[in-house]
Image (cartoon, rainbow, N blue to C red):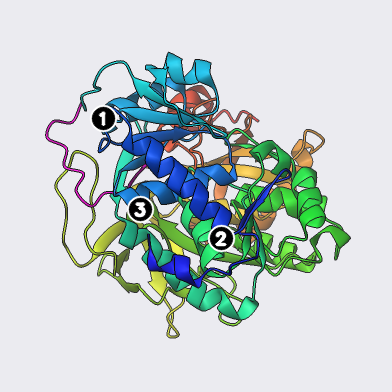
Amino acid sequence: MHSWINKLPDNSPLLSNADEAWDKATLLKKIARIKESLSQRKNPHAPVGILSDNHPEWLAIDLATQSLGITLVPLPSFFTPSQWVHTIRTSGMQAIFCAHDELARNLGFVFKNSYAGHFGLFESASSINSLLHDVDLTDVQKITFTSGTTSEPKGVCLSTAQQWAVAESLETILRPLAIKKHLNCLPLAVLLENIAGAYTALLCGAENICLPLAEVGLHGASAFDANTCLNAIAQYQIESVILLPQMLQAMTAACEVHDERIKSLKFVAVGGAKTPVALIESARSKGIPAYEGYGLSECSSVVALNTPSHQKTGSVGKALPNRKIRISPEGEIEISGQGSTRYLGHETSDQEWLATGDLGHLDEEGFLYIDGRKKNILITSFGRNVSPEWPESLLIGQTEIAQAVVIGDGQAFLSALIVPSSSLISQDQLEAAVQRVNQDLPDYARLGAWFTAEPLTTNNGLATANGRPKRTEILKQYEQQLNAIYSGAVIQ
């Protein structure tokens, strides 16, 4: 077991939900039982999956596989069935922890192991051969699959040491906050919550409040009830949470100034996608202590983070103690400190510096600013380069606008798809919001046209799980509107 286990308090709750609270001794007993059941499988060394809602046992399973040196493959509940099947077949997992017998059996895991816990441990009827031949999982404790911008998830391979190095760095910079209660608001199958949330809370000696996601207001990957989350924060006197930008936007809108429900909060980390400066400022004006960070799966989640003692609005903070950041001559963010980088089915890369695909810049104090995605750059017909994330962040910073996607590669002007924040928002209000944004942009980056659309979600295939727009799919979906805009007839 990782050396941090000896640092945990003996009698304080570490993992809790509405029904039970586990201290160190209880957690170790749970881990021992899980290890015994895993060792009794037909193929005790094969990868094992987990498909479930948040629960304290999820983390116990994670820690048990680390202790045994077994590869764990978390399956996000918001994946489609075809994405689950792809994940299972590419990883070659031979068993899965799942709370629903029928779901496990539908995925090909028909024999239920003797393990008796919140989840069942199901084994496959026959060996599942990985679609990726000669997959070497040496030192791979976790394969985290991200849906990204394509339909087939991509597997990032991580070691136990890589994951805990991030948690240890986060614990170092967050230690002054003395956080005692963390609420898991994102799925534990998402690396951001798994490492930056749960692991870091354990290292801080804090209690992870691990409720079913519906009890913190999250439904699927894109539906969020902010009042449910706020009520949970108040009920459990939560001191820290991790939110995606759209979740922060909803929470800010639901809060009164210095809302009693958020009095206990000390730290709200925001990540997963670019967060508008106006949203951070609006949240703080309500009393929400919001701080933006930056990371990626290849680096075991967080790379940089703002904190109360070291922060600049508009930046994503400084590099964690275990990371170094530099900017390439082309403006691309490069990161060192991860060690090897590896995707499932690909050769391991031992290059010191990882090219992230993100564009950014560092100020004189070392704060990192994200300028956009390298591959998303729009080049207008006048030869001007524009990162769409720049005007998009200004649009989303307007209270009338929930989502925005800026388009216009090869065109004389830029246009925008806009999702209103409410069905009550009028076209005139949206036009006024667009004009306010245009006043803050140079002429080549201003919006010459816009149209409204339905929300971009994982269900309609137009957004990733962390809220990033799937730009290629959006261009296909709204081809008619865009053709009309650029042929001179504007549809709104």
Asked which secondary structure carries label 1, the reply is loop
Frontmost of labels 3 and 1 is 3
Q: Which mark is residue 67?
A: 3
| Mark nearer the N terminus (3 vs 1) | 3
| Mark nearer the N terminus (2 vs 1) | 2
> Is 158 placed left or right of 489 in the picture?
left
Q: How many marks?
A: 3
Q: Is residue 162 visible?
A: yes
Q: Amino acid at mark 3?
A: Ser
> Is 203 placed left or right of 355 in the picture?
right
Residue drawn where x is 77% and y is 38% of the image: 422
Residue named by callout 2: 24
Q: How many angstroms separate mark 3 from mark 1 (CA)? A: 20 Å
> Foreground: 392 or 108?
108
Based on the picture, tell me whether residue 132 belongs to the magenta stretch.
Answer: yes
Q: Is residue 432 above or below residue 418?
A: below
- Write down the region rendered in magenta: 131-147
Q: Is residue 449 above or below residue 303?
A: above
Label 3 environment density (alpha carbons within 10 Å; few <14, some 14–19, many ≥20): some
Q: Is residue 315 above or below residue 388?
A: below
Magenta highlight: main SS: loop
Label 1 environment density (alpha carbons within 10 Å; few <14, some 14–19, many ≥20): many
